Image (cartoon, rainbow, N blue to C red):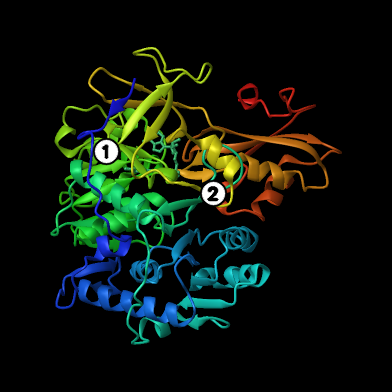
Amino acid sequence: MIHRGRPATIDVPDLTLTEYVLGREPTDGDDRVALVDADRTERITYAELGADVAAVAGGLAALGVRPGDVVALISHNQPVYAVAVHGIVAAGAAVTPINPAFTAAEIAKVLRASGASVVIAAVPAAAAVAEAADAAGVAHRFALGEHPGFRPFAELRGCGLAAPRIEVDPATAVAALPFSSGTTGLPKGVRLTHRNLVANLEQNRVGWPVGADEVLPASLPFFHIYGFTIILNTGLAARATVVTLARFALDDYLRMLQEHRATRAFLAPPVVLQLATAPAVDDYDLSSVRLAVCGAAPLDVAVAERAEQRVGWPIRQGYGMTEASPGTHQVAEDEFATTPAGSVGRLLAGTDGRLVDPATGEDAAPGEPGELWVRGPQVMPGYLDDPGATAATLVDGWLRTGDIARVDDDGVFWIVDRLKELIKYKGYQVPPAELEALLLTHPDVLDAAVVGVPHAEGGEAPKAFVVAARPVGAEALMDWVAERVAPYKKVRAVEFVERIPKSPTGKILRRELR
Ligand code: AYL
């Protein structure tokens, strides 16, 4: 049975992402604030944004960047992030967003896999980026500020060149190339076309329209698809004001909501947990916020209800994945009161869904849970350079989500379990295969398997099962991993075992370990 979104179809404007977000009309004369950081040290108006994006696109084109090229952007949230994203996209290139907490080795992997020809880095990440760019052979380096060995991004922004006239087909050209491990294995480049991203912005707008007078607090990172589409590009396309927070700390976040009079909130489950429990919540006036969305990992209903009581606004879920730009489900604003906090709402406009019995590959019986498959204009055409992973993930035009869902008679969905091996720590993707491969390079490790286990703050955290060649301490092993991965990927528990349970074909039996 195929479930349909509300409405079942949607018209997707035939525009590039930047044309859609910034408008085809010039923004000069629009002096309203597009972006400001929480401390009000950097502010960009819509007029400046339009002019700066054009200049950056012109500067990148002068450097030789052409449609089909990839530019890496490695930064925490700050107003200039939007100038970089749309400068890259307006040059016809794809932006590959990278977490600035990555180690040099992790950054180098993404630079190599994406084929980036230019990197743009925030200053705190610049040392690691320089090492990674050396290793990956990326010659063009810009810093969002000043850093030795990097040209200042201000040179591009102030170059005075006009945006190039580019020939890109929004339906096929890639605008963003985020990395995701999807349902299995190592992170892969997710090819999101202009049309995918424009479609998702349109789809979200149907049930969740943001007005030009709104203030959107951006505490979730723009390098993750949630921050990229649902906050940054949604806010700019609406001509609202986006307020950036460089890194999440509860007090800074609450102060931002209060001082900037934020109109809605974008949450992930660990933030909801803090809103439910931290005493600081009572010290701030949060009355400007009307409603909040939560996504990226399962939300505990009791925690959500406690948070709602304390903050005074309703919290309802959105759901999706990087491969779907990311939204596929959302509780529409006008259904907040009638949809329980545990539900992810309905399929978005123009999105189809099915529930498939993972054992048989047939549709699940009515009323029964099954693996959620989704289809719509926001779904990627495939991974970069990985036909095997693409074929395993996209089946007859359907995206297999690797999540188990159920749906009620009215078309309202619940995510009830995760089938895929992916671990989510604070909503961030931790691919077990990456930690397993790393552990196997440790001289004392013969075999290893990593699974997600419940974790108070993170929701879920990686635990390693290890077959040791000789006695080695759990703490020592965890420290060794911690030196080699971004903090959110840390292994947080170790258990030594005699052997790793595997199928006859050598596949790790994670369910048994869990
Ligand atoms: P990725 N409940 C349970 N699990 C979820 C939820 C949710 N509401 N949202 C995302 N996930 C899990 O690529 C699920 O396993 O994109 C899914 O396959 O980092 C995986 O996270 C995808 O992880 C919004 C607001 C989407 C946020 C998002 C998050 C996208 C995360 C739509 O409106």
Left-right relation of 287 to 169: left
- Percent across and percent down for residue 357 are 47, 18
Q: Is residue 151 above or below residue 391?
A: below
Alpha carbons under labels 1 and 2: distance apart: 35 Å
Question: What residue is shown with label 2?
Answer: 488
Answer whether residue 46 is visible to the viewer in this image: yes
Q: Quadrant of ligand 1?
A: top left
Left-right relation of 471 to 405: right
Q: Which mark is residue 350?
A: 1
**Quadrant location of the N terminus in the rendered image:** top left
- Percent across and percent down for residue 312 are 19, 40
In the image, what residue type sits under mark 2? Answer: Tyr
**Quadrant location of the C terminus in the rendered image:** top right
Residue occupying the point 30% across, 64% down: 18
The image quarter containing residue 46 is bottom left
SS state under label 1: loop
- Percent across and percent down for residue 352 are 32, 32
Residue occupying the point 55% across, 66% down: 116
In the image, what residue type sits under mark 1? Answer: Gly
Left-right relation of 403 to 389: left
Counting residues from the start of the chain, the first of labels 1 and 2 encountered is: 1
Outermost right residue: 470
The image quarter containing residue 159 is bottom left
Q: Is residue 16 above or below residue 209?
A: below
Left-right relation of 211 to 99: left
The image quarter containing residue 451 is top right
Residue occupying the point 44% across, 68% down: 67
- Percent across and percent down for residue 177 are 47, 56
Q: Is mark 2 within 8 Å of ligand 1?
A: no
Answer whether residue 282 is visible to the viewer in this image: no
